[in-house]
Image (tube, helix red, strand yellow):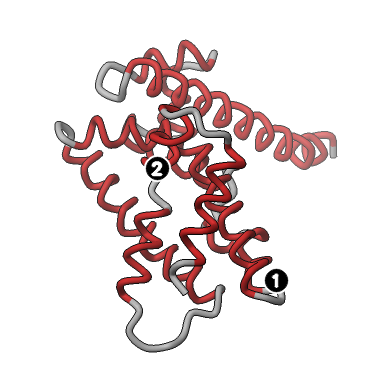
Amino acid sequence: MSYVNKRRYDSPLRAAQAATSRAAILTAARELFIAQGYGATTVDQIAQRAGVSKPTVFSAVGNKAEVLKAVRNVAMSGDDDPRSVTDREDVAAIAAAGDRDHAIDLTAAHIVDVVARYHQVHEVIRGASGTDPVVAGLWETGERERRIGAGHLLQRLGAPAGPRHRALDRLWLLMAPDNYDRLVIRRHWSRRHFERWLADQIRALF
């Protein structure tokens, strides 16, 4: 009887410990990737900074490329929930906004939230994509997924049916983390100023 109870209560504990280890690994990896680049970062360094063993990195997340992909996903989504960005509540709120002007403001705020978390990781992936074919594939996947996301946002904004590839291309470009990096980080725009500029650019699509 005691053995059955132990198994019943140990399972949630093990799951919590695994989640804690995974979170520590992803945090450590993000810090190292940003500080010294993907190529210079090793799994040993990630394990050491996370306070886990090297085998734990592989069992909890995977190899270095899989760690980078997981870091990317968390940076884009804001957490380790497997739901896509477009399945989140803030995107659903865009379709429920009631009028396009408010929906555009919500869209701009959503995009800024994503790129503020993600722009540094985006630069890591860009930097390594020229020398690592696996990371190059991740870069191309990110570009493709952003265009798909732009299509979802246009649909939620009530874009008219029919040919809209130019509006889609323009929103895909506006959503690029490069814009945040150049204007907020390099040119010292305030986040609020950037968000208003972005909303104005999205309004121009209509």
> 21 or 189: nearer the eye?
189
Q: Provide the secondary structure element on which disc 2 rests.
A: helix
Tell me residue 33's x, y (percent). 38, 23
Q: Which mark is residue 182?
A: none
- The residue located at (37%, 88%) in the rendering is 162
Quick one: which residue is furthest to the bottom in this view? Answer: 162
Q: Is 195 displayed left or right of 128 in the figure?
A: right
Identify the residue at image location x=61%, y=41%: 192
Q: CA distance from mark 2 to mark 1?
A: 26 Å
**Which kind of residue does numbered mark 2 sit on?**
Asn
Where's residue 67, x and y in %? 40, 33
The crowd level at tag 1 (other Cα within 10 Å; few <14, some 14-19, many 20+) is some
Q: Nearer the viewer, residue 121 or 43?
A: 121
Reading the image, the residue beneath label 1 is 97
Secondary element under disc 1, as helix, strand or loop, is loop
How many residues crowd around disc 2 within 10 Å: few (fewer than 14), some, or many (20 or more)?
A: some
Left or right: 91 as drawn, with respect to 60: right
Q: At 67% across and 33% down in the image, what residue appears?
A: 14
Q: Quadrant of residue 182?
A: top left
**Residue at image location 39% in from the left, 16% down from the top:** 35
Which numbered disc flags the more N-terminal residue, 2 or 1?
1
The residue lying toward the viewer, choosing from 2 and 107, is 107
The residue labelled by disc 2 is: 179
Displayed quadrant of residue 169: bottom left
Q: Is residue 202 above or below residue 179?
A: below
* Image quadrant occupied by the N terminus: top right
Amino acid type shown at disc 1:
Ala
Please say if 190 is above or below 165. Answer: above
Q: What is the count of numbered marks?
A: 2
Q: Whole-percent x and y of residue 49?
A: 49, 12
